[in-house]
Amino acid sequence: MSILMNLIYLSVLAIFSPWLMWRMVVQNKNRRGWSAKFFGHVPRRNSDAKCLWFHAVSVGEVNLLKPVIARIRKQHPEVDIAVSSTTETGRKLAAEIFPDDTTFFCPADFSWAIKRTLRRLRPDQLILAELELWPNLIGIASKQSIPVSVINGRLSERSSRGYQKLGFLFRPIFQRIDWVGAQSEDHAQRFISNGCDAKKVTVTGSVKFDGVQTDRNNAATLELRGVATAHGITKKDFIFVGGSTQLEEDLLLVDAYQRLRQTHPELRLILVPRHPQRVAQLCRALENRHQQFALRSSLSTAFETDTILIVDVIGELSAWWGLADAGFVGGSMGSRGGQSMIEPAGFGVPVCFGPNTTNFTSTVSALIENEAAEVVSNERQIETFMKWAMEMPGLAQAMGSRAQKVVAQNTGAADRTVAGILALSQLAPVESPAQTKPSIVSAA
């Protein structure tokens, strides 16, 4: 299997090498971490303590590790923690969040890179955030008797169908996973349908509920409040945040904003694009619309009241949600499956999002059932939501309060996740509260 996968990867790499070179030269991307990615030259671990290797693809997955690793640190400070990420932004954030732990670029799924990484790191468990189904990574770890777990497990219906169509390739990989902490019953059943042992699948809930900030007076938000005030955004303004947006969604928000500003001059729009590298496209589009804007990375003086603030730096979205009076969660109008709406819910922000939220089905269901968010399908509906939130502040605040209650009702996943991780590595939990006991999913 390893030889076959290596040949497939090398063929794909040869085909896409011109594109990769273009990204490196023109977009200044993917320039770092080549030694680790292609040859497994990760930091060598010299300690004989047990080691837990967490792999998180990018920024979102790195953030969800915070409550899990914090709990493990509290219960077992003697354990070595290693955190890998695939992207440069994820690697940078991991180094910032876990400065005392080993952080590195995850090796690509070439067998030689995986084997060298395992030799240098000597992990006692490989823990994949949400799902990174790399055949060589999981297969080689399993052959070396290194338990493999998936935490905050998420498997959409579409992805599940795709894996089942290629069952001859992926089913053996699912069968090698030693434990899955799934976000919901639906996700759990999909893992089982693809080959996971039902006895090794647990519904833990989403860890993102545990890691969410709920206090608007947290240090990061207070700092940004000072930044906003210094540049002309006052408490009298109504701040609408578009978070984790795609370019098309940004433009929908801008068009709605431009119309509403004519009758609601207190409206201020802050856009936090999902991919900062696409900010240049957004800026050109705003120039074509004769719309003033300012970039977070280059703020100098106060700007005009009709200026849109574009946050083009990594890691600030959560803090900006703490300033929002209302907002829109991106990735939900196209085919991406949505971005997390848990962060604004934690702050009690009334939000809307598009109809495509397959990545967060259970979260959306809980919010909608509790009238704690609204689904919008087009620009006019976004505009209507903006106007409603401004003109009916009491109702909007009530929606936000209901969203906060949904978050409070869904905490505890981090404790259940840690219980599963510790059990798999035969590490005794210091505390075992009854409410954190994992539940086994039936195969039915």
Image (tube, helix red, strand yellow):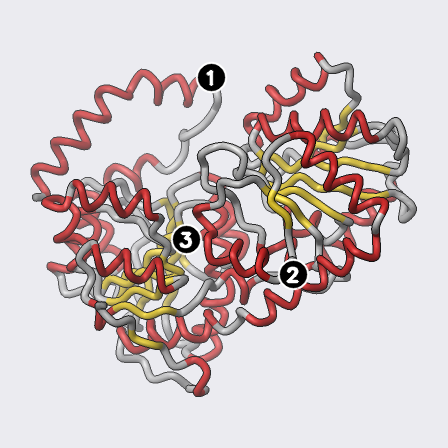
Q: Is residue 370 visible?
A: yes
Q: Classify 10 Å Cα crowding around label 1: few (below 14), some (14-19), many (20 and above).
A: few
Which residue type carries mark 1?
Val
Nearer mark to the viewer, of 2 and 3 = 2
Identify the disc placed on residue 266.
none
The location of residue 208, given as percent across then percent down, is 51, 60
Q: Residue at 70% across / 59% down in the picture?
A: 348
The location of residue 262, given as percent across then percent down, is 88, 27
The residue beneath circle 2 is 403
In the image, farthest residue toward the top: 288
The residue beneath circle 1 is 26
Q: Quadrant of residue 178?
A: bottom left
Whether residue 106 sits left or right of residue 378 in the image: it is left
Q: Nearer the viewer, residue 152 or 265?
A: 265
Identify the disc placed on residue 103.
3
Query: Dividing the image into 4 quarters, which one contains the N terminus?
Result: top left
